[in-house]
Image: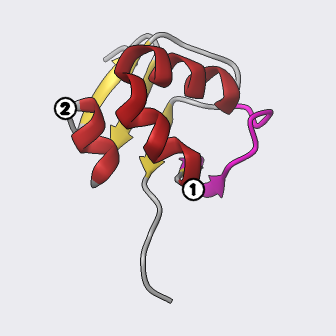
Amino acid sequence: MAEPAGILVRYFASAAEASGREEEILPSVATVGQLRAVLVERYGDAMTRVLASGSFLVDGVVSRDDDRSVGARVDVLPPFAGG
């Protein structure tokens, strides 16, 4: 079975609320910054607020570095409460 073209993006908690879905396949991008721009363009202010303090899980590593390369799957994580 061929792998899907693009990036599997999974959304959690407020990120899922902002996108209106739990996951989707988006066109391939090279970096977290490019993915951030696609998500803001696609989902507007609600996603902008989530991404302002949230993070991305790329290859099992939490990142807020816009220059980090992305692979086949990225999880969009909202800010977490607690300590």
User: Which class describes the residues within 10 Å of circle 2: few (<14), some (14-19), or many (20+)?
Assistant: few
Residue 16 shows up from this direction? yes
Find residue 24 and report its horizontal and vertical position in percent: 29, 25
Q: Which mark is residue 6?
A: none
Q: Are marks 2 and 1 in contact (CB under 8 Å)?
A: no
Q: Nearer the viewer, residue 48 or 72?
A: 48
- The answer to whether one can see residue 12 in this image is no
The answer to whether residue 63 is magenta is: yes
Vertical side of 16 occupied by 24: above or below: above
Horizontally, is 83 left or right of 32 in the view? left
Q: Is residue 74 left or right of residue 18?
A: right
Q: Identify the residue shown where x is 29% and y is 37%.
A: 18
Residue lying at 60% horizontally and 31% vertically, measured from the top left: 71
Q: Residue 28: x, y in percent?
A: 55, 13
Q: Position of residue 5 (x, y in %)?
A: 43, 10
Q: Nearer the viewer, residue 69 or 51?
A: 51
**The residue under label 1 is which amino acid type?**
Gly
Residue 3, x across and y down, in percent? 40, 19
Q: Which segment did they paint magenta?
A: 56-69
Q: Residues within 10 Å of mark 1 (few under 14, many from 20)?
A: few
**In the rendered view, does 46 fall on the left or right side of 54?**
left
**In the displayed image of the protein, which residue is found farthest to the front?**
45
For label 2, the SS is loop
Q: Tell me the quadrant of the picture where the N terminus can be found.
A: top left
82 or 70, nearer to the observer: 82
Q: Earlier in the sequence, mark 2 or mark 1?
A: 2
At label 2, the amino acid type is: Gly
Q: From the image, tell me which residue sits under label 2.
A: 20
Residue labelled with disc 1: 60
Is residue 48 within the magenta segment? no
Place residue 34 in its image quadrant: top right
